Amino acid sequence: MDTPTLIRVALEALGGGGPEKLPTPGTAELKRMYSLMHLGRVLDDKAPNYLKQAIGWSYHAPCAGHDGIQLALGLSFRASQDYLFPYYRDLMTCLAGGLTPLEIILNGISKAADTASGGRHMSNHFAKPEIGIQNVSSLTGNHTQHAVGLARAVKYYKSDAIVFSSQGESSLSEGYCYESINGADREKLPVIFVVQDNGYGISVPKRDQTANEFACENFTGFQNLKIIRADGLDVMDSMRAMREARDYVWTGSGPAMVYATCVRIGAHSNSDKHEWYRDASELAAAKAADPLPRFRAFCLKNGLDEAELKAIEAENLVSYNEASEKAIKSADPKADSIFDFVIPEGWSSEKFPDGTHHETGEAVSLIQSLNQTLKEEFRSNPDTFIWGQDMANKEKGGIFNVSKGMQPEFGPGRVFNAPIAEDYIVGTANGFSRFNDKIRVVVEGAEFADYIWPAAEQIVECSHEYWRTNGQFTPNVTIRLASGGYIGGGLYHSQNVEAWLTNLPGIRVVVPAFADDAAGLLRTAMRSRGLTLFLEPKFLYNSKLAQAVVPSDFAVPFGKARVRSVGSDLTVLAYGTPVHFALEAARKLEAEGRSVEVIDLRSLSPLDTETIFASVKKTHRALIVHEDKVFGGFGGELAAQLASECFSWLDAPIERVGSTFTPVGFNRILERATLPNTDRVLAGMRKVLAY
């Protein structure tokens, strides 16, 4: 079937009416609606000119052909009351939702005054967080995760807000979109998914995305999801669909999906040559379906005259020209501003400013310290939540029972299981924390660190939220991960992931080796704004090696290492389980008359370079020890910094000890052959000292 026929058949199937047509708006409202729709088209049509003049707007995805549903969506959104997650084609939506023409253009040409990001994010990614229009990244459809997480908070806090999530039909092919819709359906959340179907994902036709003509039919099995079709080219039918969705969501019965059939009149974006894959008849059919003249005719038929419409159009051109002139004169971002809003400053304790103590008493295990600290923080902050896989079923608290007993004490509203979907676990944490800056979310991102890879995109997303929004939002989330080996776990139960995580600006990465530091770092993470990856060496959970006295309200600041053994001949930098190998090896060398200083890094990002450099300048030798692979491991960064800052003080090459460049095998013989141990650390120490 040719494309023009497909457009006609699709619109006929929708019927253009629905179960209840809306009454025709009065003339004042029609004027407002037409003014917005026409002004949106003016902005959309003018956008390519800025690139031609080398002013900006280098990414522009035209909204022409989507105007009907976008106007309805924008008008359904209540500024400063609801929440809206637009996608990159939602110019008309954002204009109708509350952005001014000036704000649209400032975003397009990436000026410092851009309300979305101050020029940090791609053009055509419109936002205004202060009124609820969220800053959405370029990861297609991934914001559905955040919308669902925010809707969960809306429901928990008993707000009457609605969360709107807008996207193209092709993004429904993404797994995280399915996870989001599944989760919203299961939890009956107040979110409306608006799907704008123009038949293409860039140049990929819908038939290459799904077997169903309407992708919404892929979701008909969801029990609580109400699917509402709309003629997205017809403003009034789009308004009808949005009202029906809103009314359904307000009943508390579940989420809704408004599936609107549109056309894409232009190319996907200004870098797309749609003539290469769309023939002349298809382009003519798309243009003939243009919703703007269709709504103009509707206005003429229902009380407005030609003179009134022409006056509106003339006024819009004046408004556009004034906004454009002002935007072009607006200041550009300053180059040194790149260092602003990378990550919020962490919370610090006045009682334990350097994260050390001299408390005596009964030592507890690392796992006990984590459980105790979680409960203490939940008692002190009622806006604290935790979820994850298999970690909140009555008394059970995960595979390792870190969260044991939390659900009975704090209830299933604050402590609950998530579906087995790591992306969803982390993505909804991002969204949930948007509701209130007092909220702190802790998630078990995966049952084992090795399983975190499905959530990698959401961790990356969280890592640049604060920077991308120019400081307007940061996800206040602590992601707990049971990390490392020595338990006979094999693949997916023994790997380390910190080398990848520390490459991401905008997140903190901490790794405790003792129970007191585990408690102190967790408390700091949970009281801080921003994202912290909290890696828990699972071998140490119940090991006597990690037992320590934990003072009341103990806290460890980010970026502060701890000298575990003072020495003068060699500096050993370690974190996690290998700290204990280093301490044991240092004791053996001490019997031989050699003095080794062991530094427990505790915090990898931020890193305590002051303590590290001071120690190496004193001992003139350095050995780096970690459990992860030597090749590509975090130790490479440490070695590079030492070579750069301490080269003239070094009397020997910097050496590293870690795992072999192989996976960790299941058989204990294979595991021992892979992972570092005290003997290997001792051999490394001897090598450096012998140089």
Image (tube, rainbow, N blue to C red):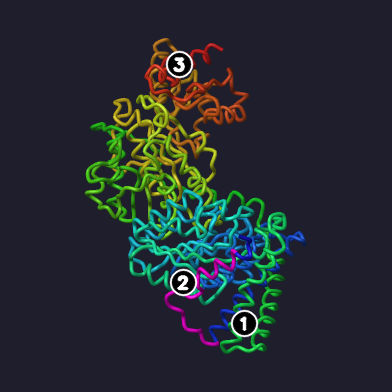
Q: Which residue corresponds to mark 2?
A: 241
Q: Which residue corresponds to mark 1?
A: 297
Q: Position of residue 404 (x, y in %)?
A: 25, 41
Q: Residue furthest front?
A: 1
Residue at the location (40% across, 33% down)?
A: 483
| Residue 554 visible in the shown view | yes
- Kind of residue indicated by mark 3: Arg
Q: Is residue 442 above or below residue 267?
A: above
Q: Quadrant of residue 588?
A: top left
Helix or strand or loop: what does disc 1 sit on?
helix
Q: Is residue 195 above or below residue 570?
A: below
Per the rendered image, the range of residues in magenta is 6-27
Residue at the location (43% across, 37% down)?
A: 510
The answer to which of 238 and 502 lies nearer the viewer is 238
The answer to which of 653 and 247 lies nearer the viewer is 247
Query: Magenta span has 21?
Result: yes
- Kind of residue indicated by mark 1: Ala
Q: Quadrant of residue 667?
A: top left
Q: Quadrant of residue 514?
A: top left
Dot 3, how many residues are within 10 Å of its Cα: few (below 14), some (14-19), or many (20+)? Answer: some
Q: Position of residue 387 (x, y in %)?
A: 34, 48
Dot 1, how many residues are within 10 Å of its Cα: few (below 14), some (14-19), or many (20+)? Answer: some
- Kind of residue indicated by mark 2: Ala
Nearer the N terminus, badge 1 or badge 2? 2
Kindly report which numbered mark, 2 or 3, lies closer to the viewer in this rendering.
Answer: 2
Residue at the location (67% across, 52% down)?
A: 335
Q: Which residue corresponds to mark 3?
A: 680
Per the model, the C-alpha gap separating discs 2 and 3 is 67 Å
Nearer the N terminus, badge 2 or badge 3? 2
